[in-house]
Image (cartoon, rainbow, N blue to C red):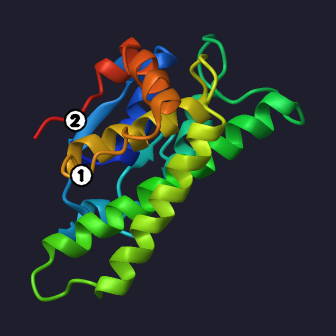
Amino acid sequence: MKLFYSPTSPYVRKVMASAVQRGLAGRIEKLPTNPHDCPPALLARNPLSKVPCLVTEDGLALFDSPVICEYLDSLGEAPPLFPRPGSAARWQALKLQALGDGILDAAVGRRTAATQAGEGATPAWHARQQAVIARALDALEADPPGGALDIGTITTACALGYLDFRFAAEPWRPGRPRLAAWYERIAAEPALIETAPHA
C-alpha cells in the first residue's frame, strides 16, 4: 500500500496510529506530499488534493481518514478498531470519531488561515472555530472517553495532540482535569507515541 502523507497532518497521524495498532504500518509506503501544491501524482489519485490518500495493493485510491481507517480495519487479524455494526460500542466510537474530527477541522482551519498571508479569515470566523473546539473539549470533559484504543479514542487523542502541537499558547487542560488525565494515559500507547508529530 502507498500513503500520500504530510508528516504534521493530524489526519495522517490518525491513519498511521490505526495502522500501527492493526499491525499494518510495515505494509505502507509513505509518499511525502504537499497537498497545497496540488502535485500531479496526488491529483491523479485524489481530485480533492488532500492527504491522507491511501492506494491499496490492488490500486484503489481511498481518501478521507474515516474511510482509510475503516479499510485498514478490514485487514489482518488484530482486534478491530471499529466495533461490531449495530452495537452500542460502535455508535460510541463513531460519535467520538466525529467529535475528534470536528475539533481537527476547526483547528486545522485556523492553522491554515493563520499561515496564508493576506488570506486569513475574519476575527469572527476564528472566534467561531475557537468556540467549536471549546464546546467539544467541554463535552469530552463531562464524559471522558474509555480506555481502549478504537477509532474514537485514536481520533480524540490525535485531536488533543494537535492542539498541543499547533496551539500550545492556548492550553486546553485548565478546567478539564478528567480529560487531561485520560489523555495522559492514552498518549502513552505505542501507536500514539510512534506517530507523535515533530516540528
- Of the image marks 1 and 2, the number of the one nearer the N terminus: 1
Q: In front: mark 1 or mark 2?
A: 1
The three-letter code of the residue at mark 2 reads Pro
Q: Residue furthest right?
A: 86
Q: CA distance from mark 1 to mark 2?
A: 13 Å
Disc assigned to residue 167: 1
Describe residue 97's horizontal placement relative to residue 26 as left or right: right
Disc assigned to residue 62: none
Residue 97, horizontal then vertical, whole percent: 60, 44
The three-letter code of the residue at mark 1 reads Phe
Looking at the rendered structure, the secondary structure element under dot 1 is loop
Q: Is residue 187 above or below residue 95?
A: above
Residue 87, horizontal then vertical, whole percent: 88, 31
Q: Is residue 24 above or below residue 126?
A: above
Alpha-carbon neighbours of circle 1 within 10 Å: few (<14), some, or many (≥20)? some
From the image, which quarter does the N terminus lie in?
Answer: top left
Q: Quadrant of residue 50?
A: bottom left
Q: Which residue is mark 2?
A: 197
For the point 43% across and 29% down, the residue is 180
Residue 48, horizontal then vertical, whole percent: 41, 71
Residue 149, horizontal then vertical, whole percent: 56, 20
From the image, which quarter does the C terminus lie in?
Answer: top left
Is residue 15 in sight in this rendering?
yes
